[in-house]
Amino acid sequence: MAGRLEGRVALVTGASRGIGRAIALAFAEEGADVALVATNEALLASAAEEVQGMGRRALALRVDLADAESIKDAVESAKKELGGLDIVVNNAGITADQLLLRHKDEDWDRVMQVNLGGAFRVTKAAARYLMKSKAGRVINISSVVGLTGNPGQSSYAASKAGLIGFSKSVAKELASRGVTVNVIAPGFIETDMTAALTEEQQAKVLEGIPLGRMASGREIAHAAVFLASDAAAYITGEVLRIDGGLAM
Ligand code: NAP
C-alpha cells in the first residue's frame, strides 16, 4: 500500500532527537524524503541513516536556528537537493526555566530566537516552495503551556503562545495558495526535555494528566502525519492538543 506522504519532501527542525526525530521517521515510513535540521552532527547523521534505511532520501542540515543567515541557506539546499518542499515542521525548541524575577534577558532572547524566530525564518524561506506544492503544509509544534501558562516558564510559554498567533496569521495568508498551517500542542512527552524534570516534578505532572501517563514522541508523530496528509486538506489554523487531557 502506498504511504500517505509518498512523493512529498519534508523539512523537520529539531530532527536529531525526541519528537522531531519521531516525526522525521514517521514521515519517511509514509513515503516522504526528509531534510533534517538540528545542531548535533552525530545524532543528525544517525537519524538520516534511519530515514535512508527505509528507502527514502535524507539530507542532514547542521543549522543553529538562532542564526538567521544559515536558515535561508538550509531551506534552499533542502529544496535543491530533494527537488522541492511540500511540508515544513517547526519542531525545534528550547526552555530556559526561571521565575520571572530571576529570568535573564539573554535567556529570554535565546528562547524567542530559537522557538519563535526559527519558525518565522524557516517558514518565510520555505513559503514560496510550499505555495508551488500541490499540498503545502506547515506544522508548528507549540505546547499546552502556550495555552495555559506555567510558573517558571514565562519565556517558553510566551514563545509557544506566539507560535499559535503566528500560525493562525500565516494560515490566513497562505490559504488561497492551498497551504495549510496547523499547530500541535503537546502535553508531557518522554524526551530529553522532560527527562530534565526531577522525580518529584514528574510525579506532580502525572497527577494532573487524566490519562495518567506521558506520551511517546511517536504519538505526536501520528498526528503530524495526519496533518501533513491529504486527509487533512481542509484543516487549517487549528491547534491540536495532544496531552492526555491535561489542559481540557
Ligand atoms: P528535545 O528532546 O530537547 O529536542 C529538541 C530538538 O530541538 C533537538 O533535536 C535539538 O537538536 C533541536 N534544537 C534545539 N535548539 C536548536 C537550535 N538552536 N538549532 C537547531 N536545532 C535545535 O525536545 P522535545 O521534547 O523533542 O521537543 C520538541 C518540541 O516539542 C519543542 O519545540 C518543545 O518545546 C515541544 N514540546 C515538548 C514537550 C515535551 O514534553 N517533551 C511538550 C510540549 C512541547 P540539537 O540538540 O541537535 O541541536
Image: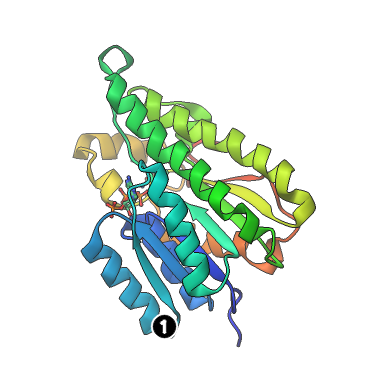
164 vs 88, nearest the viewer: 88
At horizontal 64% and vertical 49% (from top left) the residue drawn is 181
Residue lying at the far top of the rendered structure: 101
Query: What colour scheme governs how the chains and residues are painted in the rendered image of this protein?
Result: rainbow
Quick check: 87 above or below 145? Answer: below
Quadrant of the frame with the N terminus:
bottom right
Quadrant of the frame with the C terminus:
top right
Report the side of 179 relative to 44 (left or right): right
Percent across and percent down for residue 34 are: 46, 70
Residue lying at the far right of the rendered structure: 176
Residue lying at the far bottom of the rendered structure: 1
Percent across and percent down for residue 24 are: 43, 66
Residue 213 visible here: no
Quick check: 116 above or below 84? Answer: above
* Beta carbon of the mark 1 residue lies under 8 A of ligand 1: no
Q: Residues within 10 Å of mark 1 (few under 14, many from 20)?
A: some
Residue that carries the numbered disc 1 in the rendered image: 54
Percent across and percent down for residue 140 are: 53, 48
78 vs 183, nearest the viewer: 78
At horizontal 38% and vertical 80% (from top left) the residue drawn is 52
Residue 5 visible here: yes
Percent across and percent down for residue 163 are: 53, 37
Q: How many marks?
A: 1
Secondary structure under tag 1 reads: loop
At horizontal 53% and vertical 31% (from top left) the residue drawn is 162
Task: Tell me the kind of residue under disc 1.
Answer: Met
248 vs 42, nearest the viewer: 42
Quick check: 119 above or below 219? Answer: above
At horizontal 29% and vertical 11% (from top left) the residue drawn is 101
